[in-house]
Image (cartoon, rainbow, N blue to C red):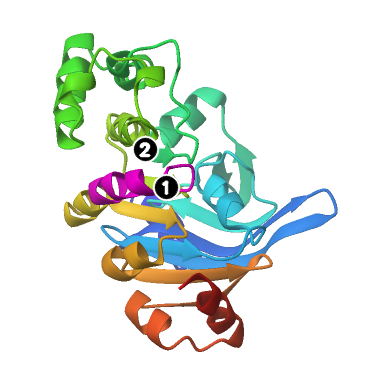
Amino acid sequence: MNAGEENQRRFGAPADAMVFARGVRKSFGPLEVLKGIDLVVPTGSVACIIGPSGSGKSTFLRCINHLEQISGGVLLVDGEFVGYDLRDGKLYEVKNSLLCKRRADIGMVFQSFNLFSHMTVMQNLIEAPTRVRGVPVQEARARAEALLARVGLSEKVNSYPRELSGGQQQRVAIARALAMNPKVLLFDEPTSALDPELVGEVLQVMRDLADSGMTMVVVTHEIGFAREVGDALIFMDQGVIVEQGLPRDMIADPQSPRTREFLSRVL
């Protein structure tokens, strides 16, 4: 039994859980942003998180890849703590080199793209695989070319981010995340910064990823996408999960009055 399997057994995580959260809390000083999140995202599934601004959605996403340290609870990715090791029942922070190695398995797509503006599209895609994973440059370039073809941007290989539309930049950002061959992809409102006519091209790439079996956790306001593509819908408010279930069922017949109120405003 490896360390991941041992952690899953110890904390009661299902064997197929890619993301497992139990009682996850996060505070910024006196402000408690997450108040005990329990969630299981099975391997190969798509979990869509919705909720009002300030409900803790993005904070929870950032906790998954340890961009934010949790204040309490258990949070595992493929059975592993990302920023900690468990020894003799206590959690110890890992060295930065190991943190970077574990974080490399978790792709993150931000709403503001976060591409390196001084690098071409190709340079953006090969930077992390060559530096973090030690992938040979030619191998990284070949994978980058395949990924750009996958997102429909082969002709932009030598372009700079400033020369691309918002939708194209976001598709490059998705390809860059995929270049690390991650186990799970996290999306933080990936279409919220886009003009309405550009949203569809990004959502189509995400649909294709879901069809390919990529595990995804998506914070989104795109209710139609959640209904069509999501395997689970999670509604958060004030730092807690108010309701979760099958997207079509929750959207058609929410059980919580708070969920019903929220959906009535966004549908």
Residue drawn at (31%, 30%) of the image: 172
Depth check: 210 or 9 in front? Answer: 210
Q: What's the amino acid at mark 2?
A: Asp
Q: Is residue 34 above or below residue 80?
A: below
- Can I make out residue 23 in this image? yes
Circle 1: residue type? Thr
Residue at the spot 36% in from the left edge and 30% down from the top edge: 165
For the point 55% across and 39% down, the residue is 83
How many numbered dots are placed on residues in this image?
2
Where residue 201 appears, as percent x and y from the top left, is 27, 45
Report the residue marked by disc 2: 105
Examine the structure image and report whether residue 102 is included in the region drawn in magenta: no
Relative to the observer, which residue lies in front, 5 or 147?
147
* Residue 196 is covered by the magenta coloring: yes
Which quarter of the picture shows residue 145?
A: top left
- From the top left corner, tell me how far across and down residue 51 is, in percent: 56, 66
Q: Quadrant of residue 247?
A: bottom left
The residue drawn where x is 80% and y is 55% is 31
Residue 2 visible from this viewpoint? no
Q: Which residue is mark 1?
A: 191
In this view, 255 is above or below 131: below
The furthest residue to the right:
30
Q: Label 2 near label 1: C-beta < 8 Å?
A: no
Residue 223: x %, y % from top left:
40, 67
Within 10 Å of the Cα at label 2, are there few (<14), some (14-19), or many (20+) other Cα atoms? many
- Dot 2 lies on which element? loop
Q: Position of residue 71 (x, y in %)?
A: 70, 52
**Range drawn in magenta:** 192-205
Query: In the rendered image, which quarter contains the C terminus?
Result: bottom left
Q: CA distance from mark 1 to mark 2?
A: 23 Å
Per the picture, the main secondary structure of the magenta-coloured stretch is helix
User: Which of the two discs, 1 and 2, sits closer to the camera?
Assistant: 1
